[in-house]
Image (cartoon, helix red, strand yellow):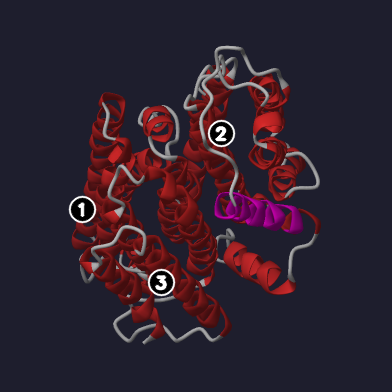
Amino acid sequence: MLLAALIILPLFGALVSWLIPYDRLRPKVLSLFTFAHLGITIQLLTFTPPESPDGWFHFDALGKIVLLSTSLLFLTCAFYSIGYLKYRRERSNRVICIGMLVCLSAASLVTITHHLGLMWVALETTTIFMAPMIYFNRNARSIEATWKYLLICSVGVALALIGLYFLAYATIVAQVEPSLLLDDLMRDAGKLSSGWVHAAFVFLLVGFGTKMGLAPLHTWKPDAYGEAPGLVGALLSGGLVNLAFLALLRVYQLCLATREIAFFQNALIGMGLFSMIVAAVFMARQADFKRMLAYSSVEHVGIMAVALGLGGKAIFGALFHVFANGLSKGVLFLSSGNIHRSYNSKSTDHVRGALRRLPWSGGLFLAGFIAVTGSPPFAPFISEFTVVSSAFIQGRYIVGTLFLVSLGIIFIGMALTVLPMVMGEAPPDSEKTSYRDSFWMVAAPLFLLLLVFLLGVWIPAPLMTLLKDGAALLEVRP
């Protein structure tokens, strides 16, 4: 019943938001339903129901990690929307409130289902309903970004669907019961046709990698993140990326069962390192600070892919990075949205001295930069250190060296953009707007920053247990 509530409750909230005729009430309805969703999530973490008799729904440790991170981020963004949408009264907020709740419902379905076909449908649902939110500003650049997002992500998800077809056909060739249930596929993994399984893994990696934004499949990210409101950028980079990563984790589980894991791991390491290198190249002297954050997202999905490819203790780092990256990106995108609103510009040529004009948002953006680049005492430091130390322990010196060099270049590139933004002098021709920091628009990113700091100095025992249980599901067994 509670698993069904995770899906039904946000959909009911979306219906209520559609029926409400007043814009000022919808953000409060959104906050109410996301708060209830987090409450149900916590209850399910405490008292997990058994697997459904048909095997379609199973709330395992991997799903719990992604759902908890996603629910926290959606709740924080919902409270942020109370203040943000007051400044956007020229636009109806019906689309963005409904879109957030439908995406939350679909995200919940991704985390609790073990049917790969149903998971695909839920992922495609998030793609479709996120598109109108990217187009919220309704200008030429936002519609271009929306179409690019829809086209590239839909092609990627379509390729993932072909991969699922190949998996299903592999069961037919092996003359076992055709199924797309993860547990059935893992049970019959030894009997599946190797050729069809290899082909399926390639298409699934490319398909879900496109949704994550792994290079060279990342080309939708700079435009979508750059043109979407900061609120939507936070959900894209900190929420929906983790859902695609969960899909890759399911493929990884199947790879383990088929004993074809080395092939998949090498592909993950290659794409992950390439993503980090691409991010390092394009982040240097980036003139648009929201596009800079998009390339930062490309970097961090690369980190997650490398960690998954390395295996071993790096798996723990990959799962912890789900929280570390998701929450840190929330801090950066929400605070950058405030800065954009104040200066009415995303150009680093016009945005200077944010700490003087917006002490809270400027400070949060600076702290978010320190956190997301893997500096102690914030959570990304732990996950990134776990990954790079695992690379050297395994004797993967080239991987570890490229990983560290990319991180160093990215840190310098981001610093050259962020430090003048927050600490420089405002240019004389910068636009003066009426926007000033308010409680709702500062409290949300501040809450996320406190969580990132807390997880950097202390991981609560229940979360540590959850991460270890998730890592155990992805261990290579003799």
The three-letter code of the residue at mark 2 reads: Ile
Q: Give me the C-alpha separation between circle 1 and circle 3.
A: 36 Å
The three-letter code of the residue at mark 3 reads: Phe
The magenta stretch spans residue 453: yes
Query: What x and y, as percent, mark residue 240?
Result: 42, 50
Residue of label 1: 165
At 27% across and 52% down in the image, what residue appears?
95
Residue of label 3: 33
Is label 1 or label 3 in front? 3
Query: What x and y, as percent, mark residue 66?
Result: 50, 61
Q: Is residue 189 above or below residue 134?
A: below
The residue tagged with tag 1: helix, strand or loop? helix
Q: Is residue 423 visible?
A: yes
Q: Answer with mark 1 or mark 3, whichever residue precedes in sequence.
A: 3
Quarter of the figure with residue 7: bottom left
Q: Is residue 312 visible?
A: no
Residue of label 2: 339
Q: Answer with mark 2 or mark 3, whichever residue precedes in sequence.
A: 3
The residue tagged with tag 3: helix, strand or loop? helix
**Start-end of magenta stretch:** 439-454
At 53% across and 32% down in the image, what residue appears?
342
At 45% across and 54% down in the image, what residue appears?
81
Q: Is residue 71 above or below residue 327?
A: below
Disc 2 and disc 1 in contact, CB within 8 angstroms: no
The three-letter code of the residue at mark 1 reads: Tyr
Q: Answer with mark 2 or mark 1, whichever residue precedes in sequence.
A: 1
**Which label number is shown at residue 123?**
none
Q: Give me the C-alpha separation between circle 2 and circle 1.
A: 46 Å
Q: Nearer the viewer, residue 390 or 282?
A: 282
Quarter of the figure with residue 454: bottom right
Q: Is residue 157 above or below residue 179?
A: above
